[in-house]
Image (cartoon, helix red, strand yellow):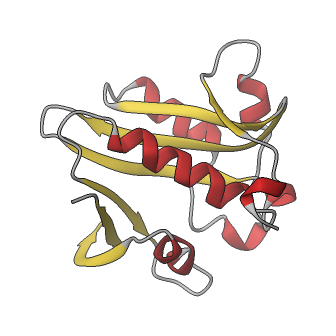
Amino acid sequence: MTHSDLKPIELRELNKSNYRDILNLKVAENQTKFVATNAHSLAQALFHETAWYRGIYVEDTAVGFVMLDLDRQKPEYYLWRYMIDSRFQRKGYGLQALELIIEFVKTLPNSHEFFLSFVPENGNPKPFYEKLGFAETGEIEDNERVMSLNFQ
């Protein structure tokens, strides 16, 4: 399946009419050690000024959630949370959505690099991120390996 075969992905702001869609999304059971629940992420976002979050939609169906840490003062841009619901994985939506997110991050002030981290256990998403050009930096943060995508 190519991108042209997929329905377009949209990153939507959350509001009182759609936040439940995002709370109902779940990763596969064997992936729960890699990402916090969306409820946990939204609670954190309330107390972090730099949190930017969106629901990932295909038409009117929520398929995932993304939360970025956009510290425009440094500037440093970080993929804080990223998940695709288990029912929508392996359909190309995750790759298509992250490409859209990367394009968004490139438009931010002084955006030269995009960071993320992953839990280095079996089944981790490192190969997925490498497909998009992310590479390990050698840094470890909170027992997670840091990767970056350089835009220069």
As drawn, the residue found furthest toward the top would be 16
Q: Position of residue 80 (x, y in %)?
A: 43, 49
- In the image, 113 versus 39, the foreground residue is 113
Horizontal arrangement in the rendering, residue 87 relative to residue 3 (left or right)? right
Quadrant where the C terminus is found in the figure: bottom left
Q: Position of residue 141 (x, y in %)?
A: 27, 67
Residue ranking furthest to the front: 4
Classify 63 as above or below 132.
above
Give the side of residue 144 with respect to residue 45, left or right.
left
Residue that lies at the very extreme toward the left in this rendered image = 74
Query: Residue placed at 63% from the left, 37% from the top?
Result: 39
Q: Is residue 36 visible?
A: no
Can residue 57 be seen at all in this image of the molecule?
Answer: yes
Which image quadrant is residue 127 in? bottom right
Q: Residue 119, position in %: x, y?
A: 46, 73
In this rendering, the answer to whether 54 lies above or below 83 is above
Q: Nearer the viewer, residue 152 or 28?
A: 152
**Above or below: residue 46 compared with residue 82:** above
Q: Residue at x 41, y 71 (%)?
A: 133
The residue lying toward the viewer, choosing from 88 and 103, is 103
Q: Nearer the viewer, residue 67 or 32?
A: 67
Q: Position of residue 22 (x, y in %)?
A: 72, 35
Dividing the image into 4 quarters, which one contains the N terminus? bottom right
* Total number of numbered discs in the rendering: 0
- The residue lying at 49 percent from left, 70 percent from top is 129
Work out whether 122 lies above or below 108.
below
